Structure formats: structure tokens, C-alpha cells
Image: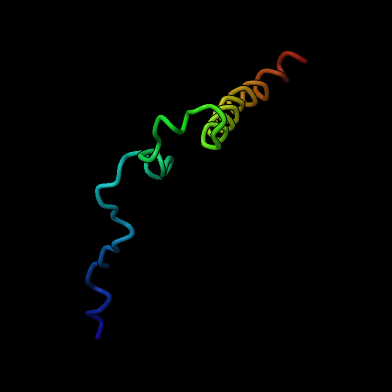
Amino acid sequence: MGDEDDHEPEQESDAAPGKEPPYQALFPNLDRMSRSSFRKGTISRRRINRALVVLSLVPVVVLAVIFLPQLLS
């Protein structure tokens, strides 16, 4: 009767990932990038450039939020 609650829960297959590459969650299509992704005028290159701009703006904004109030006071 009470034996059902005494055993340990089984591990789910979703909780234990297999041999997934280390950055698969962050960059799911990293293995599909090629030289053609960086050719001038391609959509891939435009997306890469936009992502680089956004990623470079993040530290600038963070530093501005931290240091700008100190400079103004």
C-alpha cells in the first residue's frame, strides 16, 4: 500500500541529455555554418552582422548604466 512512495523516482529521458555538443543550446546551428555564410550580400551574413552588433551593444549598455550615474553626480 505505502510501498509506492518509498522508491526513488525514475530519471526522465529529457532530464539527462545525451552526448550533446557543449554550446548546442546557445548556438543550435553552429555546425551548419560554412564559408558561404560569410559571403557578401547573403542573408546569413546580414544575420551574423546584426547578431554581432547586438552582442557588442550589450556590454556598452551595461557599462553605461553602471558608470553614467557616477559621472553625472
Residue 52 higher or lower than 10, as above or below: above
The colour scheme used here is rainbow
Nearest the viewer among 36 and 54 is: 36
Specify the quadrant of the image occupied by residue 53.
top right
Q: Which residue is drawn at 29% across and 46% down?
A: 20
Viewport quadrant of the N terminus: bottom left
In-image side of 69 versus 25 (left or right): right
Residue 26 higher or lower than 60, as above or below: below
Q: Residue at x 29, y 62 (%)?
A: 13
Farthest residue in the right direction? 72
Image location (x, y in percent) of residue 69: 73, 20
Viewport quadrant of the C terminus: top right
Image location (x, y in percent) of residue 45: 53, 31
Image location (x, y in percent) of residue 71: 73, 13
Specify the quadrant of the image occupied by residue 56.
top right
Nearest the viewer among 7 and 2 is: 7
Farthest residue in the bottom direction? 1
Nearest the viewer among 7 and 13 is: 13
Q: How many labels does the image show?
A: 0
Q: Which residue is drawn at 23% across and 73% down?
A: 6
In-image side of 5 versus 24 (left or right): left
Image location (x, y in percent) of residue 40: 53, 27
Q: Residue at x 24, y 47 (%)?
A: 19
